[in-house]
Amino acid sequence: MAVTHAAILGIGGLLLAIPVVLHLLMQPRPRPLVFPALRFVEEIQRTSRRRLQLRHWVLLLLRCLVLAAVVAAFARPSTTSAAFGDWLQMGTGGLLSILCGLVFVYAVFFSRPANVPLALIVGAVLALLLAWTGVSAAAAFGKSSGHVLANRLAPIAAAVVVDSSPRMEYRHQNSTLLQRAREEGSWLIEQLPSESQVAVMQNNGQPPFFSIDVGAAQKRIKTLESSFAGVTIPETIESAVRFLRDSELQRKEIYVLSDLTRAGWTTAGNTLRQLLSGHPEISLYVIDVGVKEPTNLSLDQLELAGATVPRRGALTTTARLQAVGPGASIVARLVLEKPDPARPVLRDGKILVPEDHWVRPETVTVADNSSTLITMSLRDDFEPGVHHGWIELESSDSLDIDNRQYFTIEVAPAWRVLVVHPDNVGPGVLVDALLPIGNDGSGLYDVTVVSQEDFAEEFLEDYGAIFLLDPAPLSDAMWRILSDWVGGGGGLGIFPGQNAARGSEAEASFRSDAAASVLPGRLERVWRARRGPDGQSDLFLAPDTLTHPVLKEFRPYESLGIWQPFPIHLHWGVEKTGDATVEILARFSNGEPALLQRRLGQGQVICLTTPITEPANRRPEDPPLWNDLFNSARAEDWPAWLLVTSIARFLASGTRDRINLLAGQTAVLRNDRDTMPAEYRLFSPRDGEPIRVVASDNSVRYKFTDRPGTYRLKGQHDGPVLRGFSVNLPPGVTDLQRIDADQVANILGEDRYQLARRREELQRQQGTARLGLEFYPILALLMSLLLALELVMSNRFYRS
């Protein structure tokens, strides 16, 4: 409980003595008269005098209450919203208790004879009212929200959180949402009392700090720019709470200016809600600067069939076209730059880039509030080297930043792949998958096939990937050679089958410590599938998730049950391991691991626990069939072909640089000091002066990838060397779908924040938070009622 003008209460207390003193001074002094014959008259006179005295005391009480109400109203008492009801109950109970007390006194002392039944009833009611008043008083005095009330001019520790995500570039009514947020934030800072401490924050992950003064805070908020760091608003509010709680100022407020889109308000758990409930002294205001019904067409989730393209191959891209609001038919363009050795170059303060392009337009249609995939391909005789490109929408809309997705590819010689097989295993399945159009140099792979007997004579450093097809036992020395080769960046694919078995157990070579240094898990024993009523195996591949690059090609068929027609009859069981470098990519329907990955140094090992090399034409004396992946008589075996090619692409491309990144990821490009420049000039999307980047440890690193676009590297080593990479926003960052009030309340907590869309709403909520809920309207009404009652009673008493 607080009062705006506390001194008035003291003055009012003195004023209350005035009616009491006047009442006592104006009492008539009786003169003694002796009329023995008029005793009966004297008795009536005494009764009338007692009634008159009671009336005067009641009138005195009303006049005192009128003065008390006037004084309290001018003192402007207030309290927090949580305690307002308790104070109101206490006041109501106090007034009713006074009235019941007067009735009780009348029934006991002034009624002749005493009205005992009325006294008992009123006394019981009075006891209940006093108990109710006492409970309300205990709650009112004991409830504290931590707010400092009744001082408009007290300095405030304030944090102004501005949502500066790319979504805030949405243009509405000739200004962006970020511009509106800056204007509202500047106005908020102007309204703060002098000597306040102000921290202007963005959702960019940077630690908060107080500006030197209010003027510095104003300047900072007016110069805020979009941030591409993926920090959510709840995370930023949590940082603001932890920052303000250490301030020495008692009054603390957080203002959040946001468009209230769900992409910026995603959160895990209830950490923020618990933190806010633990700091009730901090007032939280959310100012909605967004658009209630946004409309937007955006490109998202760009994927390449491969970042390395053969010289006479095809570039294939896939992107998602998303419509928020009305759909449309729109032209999308696939653009690929033709390298120019003289560019990029800085000229007259402007970065000049290649002007010649390959262009492929395509008209696409998306329905209202839905999305569709855009798949575009470009085939030509590409020049070797690094090429930058993008997919873009030809027409602009209210949010331009998501109308383009960038990519970088490398046109390079085919990957050199070594396929190793024992004499009793044919390599045809894998070779046919890797060279669907023949080994004429136009494919992704340059395949060399050797028998396992000749494997030791190969120089492994010549190959980017090696595939062991149902290998026979290997020596410990060979396992160690493979371990060193994979650790240096190679990709190893292993498809164990019958040759690794001795009976139903694994051969000793596959259980040795040397083999364990390579395999994702030691082979244990052969698992046999159960047979159903029709005699067919009931076991098949059953991937849980399709997020790994090896499995992402199967996303369009996730719900189609494509693996049931390809039963598994036998597979290897592997020893469970707690090695953090091992990941189970897919399981069989019995829950056992089917596809495993192990990260080994800079390279990768992929193991499928059933082979892919069994012949279709079998003889009775042949070993039992392990699976029907490539031998199904009931369906085409395209899933197995797709799985094999995905594994090959993943392992072979592991030797290439990662040249397509998301904002915030660090770019790492390999840089052989003997064949590559020692330093580069980096031209970033910011269009400023190129940055000098020095190679170290045979690599080039650059971590300031916060802005989407093309990053170009240019160096000199026996002529110009052009390299680079592309950066895009993470998926969903520009999603303009809004969250509702219930979702905000779930994140922040019920009654823990105030939501406003206009300045008038915010000013009203600020007044309530800073001064509390005032009793002035109630006191003014009570004062009016008491004055009316006093007037009625005084006229009646004096007339009688």
Image: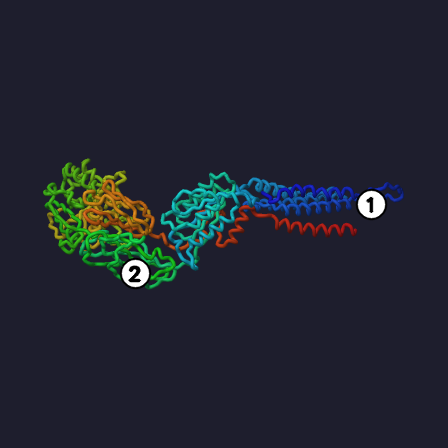
Disc 1 element = helix
Residue flagged by tag 1: what amino acid is it?
Gln
Whole-Å distance between the Cαs marked 2 and 1?
106 Å
Residue flagged by tag 2: what amino acid is it?
Ala
- For the point 38% across and 49% down, the residue is 227
* Coordinates of residue 361 in the picture (x, y in percent): 27, 62
| Of the pair 781 and 520, the residue shown nearer to us | 781
Residue 546 visible (yes or no) = no
Quadrant where the N terminus is found in the figure: top right
Circle 1 packing at 10 Å, graded few (<14), some (14-19), many (20+), is few
Residue 45 marker: 1
Disc 2 element = strand
Residue 332 marker: 2
Instruction: Using residue 212 as the reference point, say whether residue 16 is left or right of it.
Output: right
Protein image colouring? rainbow
| Of the pair 392 and 458, the residue shown nearer to us | 392
| Residue lying at the far top of the rendered structure | 513
